[in-house]
Image (tube, grey):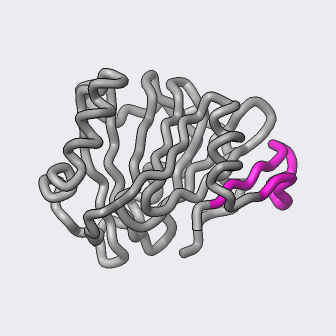
Amino acid sequence: MTRLRIYGEQTPARPHTETSDGGVIASLLNARGIRFERWQTPVQLTPGASQDEVIAAYRADIERLQQEKGYVAVDVVSLNPDHPEKAAFRQKFLNEHRHSEDEVRFFVAGSGLFSLHLDDQVYEVLCEQGDLIGVPDNTRHWFDMGPNPYFIAIRLFTNPAGWVADFTGTDIAEKFPRLEN
């Protein structure tokens, strides 16, 4: 179930806000400039599906977003618990970083945990199938797919190079809860 927890930057053990209400989640995130939407997922795909299959299934939605925001690059991250490089992929996203462009993900299947470092708070968003999250450029964040990842996410970029991170070098991400699926 999609969930939002909001923590004080100095209180990673205890969220001061927690909700699974999609409307409340969207309202709280939108107020901070984070795009959050719940979409239908009429095509059922499982992790391991090819990038071509996933893009073909959601082509109309992808094209709409490309026209709306000018995204030029699209890729698909599709991981399951049997993936031989799952630990390396998890580690790649676990440290706080930012991008010079928006990071947009649509969860076609499964789940993943976005943590957004906004001023002196951390917004932890457990994204599930049907969730679209758009993190604005230069927003400090990290992503956890858990030790046994199970998700498919479509990513859209304005940079043709795709996912390019600027790591902040802080250890804040180590202080907050991880996704233990």
Circle count: 0
Can you say which quadrant of the picture contains the N terminus? bottom right
Pick the quarter of the image with the C terminus: bottom right
Question: Is residue 81 left or right of 138 when viewed as pictured?
Answer: left
The verdict on residue 14 being magenta is yes
Q: Position of residue 146 (x, y in %)?
A: 51, 67
The picture places residue 2, in percent across and down from the top left corner, at 59, 61
Left or right: where does residue 20 sit relative to residue 109? Answer: right
Q: Choose between 1 and 39: the one closer to the eye.
A: 39
The residue depicted at 45 percent of the width and 22 percent of the height is 100
Closest to the observer, 163 or 70: 70
Q: Give the range drawn in magenta.
A: 3-18
At x 35%, y 60%, the residue is: 41
Residue 169 is a magenta residue: no
Considering only vertical position in the picture, is 177 above or below 10? below
User: In the rendering, at what x and y percent does residue 85 appear?
Assistant: 31, 65
Residue 53 vertical placement versus 100 (above, below)? below
In-front residue for pair 10/115: 115
Q: Residue furthest bottom?
A: 82
Place of residue 64 in the rendered image (x, y in percent of width and height, measured from the top left): 29, 33
- The image quarter in which residue 96 lies: top right
| Quadrant position of residue 148 | bottom left
Name the residue at 58% across, 30% down: 139
Q: Where 138 sits versus 173, above or below?
A: above
Residue depicted at 27% across the width and 50% down the height:
76
